[in-house]
Image (tube, grey):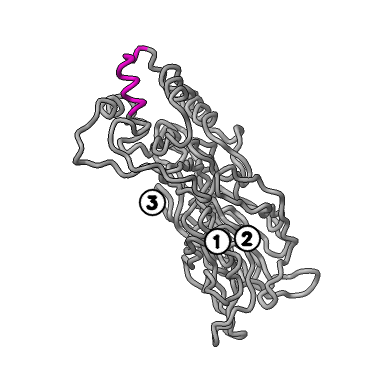
Amino acid sequence: HTVPHAGEFGYETWDRTESYGANCWSGMALDEVRGIAYLTTGGPKPNFIGVGHRGQNLFANCLIALDARTGRRLWHFQEIRHDLWDLDVPAPPNLATITREGRRVDVVAACSKIGNTLLLDRVTGKPVFPFQLRRAPTSTVLGEQSWPYQPDVQQPEPFCRQEFTAADLTDRTEEAESWAETWFRSATTGWFLPCTEGRANLFWNIDGGAEWTGACVDPDTGRLYVTANHVGWLISLFRDGDPPDDPRLPKTAGQLVYESTCAQCHATNRMGIATAPPLRGLRFRVDDAFVTNQVRLGKNAMPAHPDMAESDLKALVDFLMWRDRPVPPLPQKPERPRYGMTGYPKFYDYEGYPANKPPWGTLNCIDLNTGKLLWKVPHGEYPELAERGVRKTGTENYGGPIVTAGGLVFCAGTRDNLIRA
């Protein structure tokens, strides 16, 4: 069981009120001679919210070796501990034989969403290159216990950026750059920074890096080829102690103000859109003065409303704080509050293109013998941008490569619907 049952190894790595996930997305690889099956697993669920499954969470985010005859676990190797970012190991494993220090070594490789290549001895499960961990930021979410260390891999060289910075923002046009800078300032960013309440966290790789389609390896050279996406995502958490809206009740004055003034950015269900934060559970996070100040003065991309009538503002605050309609009694402060998230908005600019600098998709070549990233090239184009002279941007792509004995690599899955060699 990739989420261990009672009495099984790893059971104690889940401090559980909920425990699921750790699924194998994309299939296995088989060493027929040794009778060993290799599989990769996704993260624990729900994504981004770990208060109900605190701990290391074996065997999520792992490359696992099983005795194919008995199903017995031979070894496992975990990349991310207590994954709070939906950074699975989604790709099927690749089997290869490489040369290290003058001897041939049978290895298994698995590419991850964050852009690492897990390269392990097929028999022992030991890393071919040193696997380093680094101190990671601590979550500020009530009830969450983020894992203190996360992977900081140097070899094989990562094929993706792993921390979103201001230097990554698009400069495609002045308008796109200004738009991206505004949203960037309103978000949190950082290397393995956990999501926070009420403010979007901007990070890479929810759709890869590598994806389900995986990589291919040239058995003669030990070179691995893998496609990757390079697009940011904006993930917001909120403490959701609010009950569902009752459609049988008539709309209140504050609800009408909200729908005409706020819903365009924060959604009619108050779940938020893109970096506009969710407003459900607001009464647990802020007071009336905070809401009033935000509405009157605005902040970052939120416009100010200095001319809103005082009666409308009071009605709006009462609506957001659940004072204008029946509400169940407030629960006692729980040790593990219930959280929600606002969906999976990608960090796109105002024209619908990624709001980070290209390339937005690449084909990458890694020499497994040395761990060197030999090259990466943009993969795909947006035809309409190419017509305007903006070429070789790469696009999001969901097609795995194939390598031939003649040294050709074929790849597809891009926005322009082309197969490239």
Q: Which residue does the numbered mark 1 point to in the structure image? A: 89
Identify the element where label 1 is drawn.
loop
Residue at 64% x, 45% y: name it: 138
Q: Which residue does the numbered mark 2 point to in the structure image? A: 79
Q: What residue type is labelled 3?
A: Asn
> Which badge, 3 or 2, comes first in the chain's sequence?
2
Residue at 51% x, 65% y: name it: 22
Mark 3 or 2, closer to the camera: 2
Q: Which residue does the numbered mark 3 point to in the structure image? A: 417
Q: Which amino acid does label 2 sit on?
A: Glu
Residue 386 found in image quarter = top left
Residue at 59% x, 72% y: name it: 64
For residue 352, side relative to residue 34 (left or right): left
Identify the element where label 2 is drawn.
loop
**In the foreground, 9 or 202:** 9
**Residue furthest top as drawn:** 307
Identify the element where label 3 is drawn.
loop
